[in-house]
Each structure stands twice: as C-alpha cells, then as structure tokens.
Amino acid sequence: MELTLKRLALLACVTASLAARAQFNNSSLSAGPLVNSVIGQGAQYGLALEYDRYLESGFELVARAPVVIAETPVGADTPSGAGRVFGTGLSVGARYLFLEEQLRPWAGLQLTWTILITQPAPVWGLGAGPSLGLDWVFHESFALSLRGSYDVFVELNRPWRHQLSVTLGLVILL
C-alpha cells in the first residue's frame, strides 16, 4: 500500500513537471543578420531586432526594426546617387503559427516603414507584404529563427520598390 502511494506521488510529480515544460512562452526577443535585396539592385546587409508577443490560438503580434547599410550602384534612384547609405525602419504585423511545438512554421503579414539616409534628402517608404518563417526551439529559453519576407514599397514620385529579405535570428524566449 505504501509503495503504491509513493508511485502515485512520483507519477503526479512527473506529470505536473511535463505540463509546466510544455507551456508556451508569451513573448520573445530576437536579433540576427539580415540580407535585403531590392529587385534590380544589389544586396543590403544589416541587423534585425524583433519582438514577438503571443496572443491566442497560434497568433502573434510582431514588431521588427532593421538597420542596414547599402551600397547603391551608379544610376541608383536615390538623391545622392551611387555610394554607401544607411537605412532603418519599423515593421509591425501579425503572424500565425501552424505548429506550437519544437519546430514552429509560420506565415504573416506586415506593414513596413523605411528610411534611407541619403544626401541631400532622405528617401521614405511605406510598404506591406507577406512573410514566412520557421522557428526551431532548441532549449526552453532559446530558439533559432529563419524568416523570409517580400514587401512592396510605395514612395512619392517614384516607381514602386519590390524588396526581398532574409533574416536568421537567435531568439530569447521570455
């Protein structure tokens, strides 16, 4: 009888600890290298910082701030022409997690604002587009994230700008 009670107590402890480990984190912070490519121009390299907040039923809110340094080619459609420019911006959107396990594929939509610091005047852009990604949770507090996105930017007095972006991030699960 006493042995049976000990086994039940052990089973209850193990079951309770497994349930606690499987809980989903409510927010995360990530940072990692970023490669942008404006279609028809060269690559832009930088760093992306991202904050995600889990809502409910697989949906998350996402805020992302890229910082890039771009080498603009001769004949580029920027006020300063060819040379090195600095850019930043902010993306805000939502994404849906198809799985909430160790591998977490997702799809999302974002609204993006960018600024390229050029002389004599900066270039502002507002865009929107889809994104796809895969998060791999390799520890209860850490994950790796691979993210790809496509944005279409509308800029005043310019043709629309189509941009592809890929980011690899180290995620801290908060």
Image (spheres, rainbow, N blue to C red):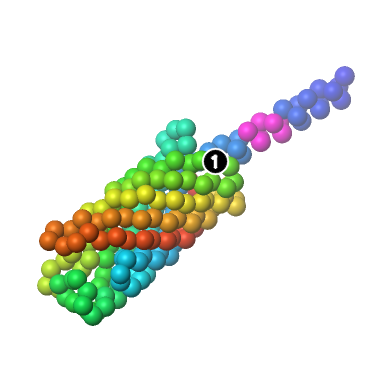
Residue at image coords 36%, 61%:
164
Determine if residue 95 is in view. yes
Locate residue 125, reporting x and y percent: 21, 58
Q: What stretch is highlighted in magenta?
A: 13-19
Q: Position of residue 8 (x, y in %)?
A: 78, 25
Q: Does the magenta stretch include residue 25?
A: no
What type of secondary structure mainly makes up the magenta span?
helix
Residue for badge 1:
99
Q: Which amino acid does label 1 sit on?
A: Leu
Residue 10: x and y in percent read 76, 30
Residue at screen point 31% across, 66% down: 38
Compared across the picture, whether 63 is left or right of 132 comes to: left
Up the image or down, 42 lies above or below 29; here it is below
Residue drawn at x 47%, y 37% as measured from the top left: 58
Closest to the observer, 94 or 4? 94
* 17 is within the stretch colored magenta: yes
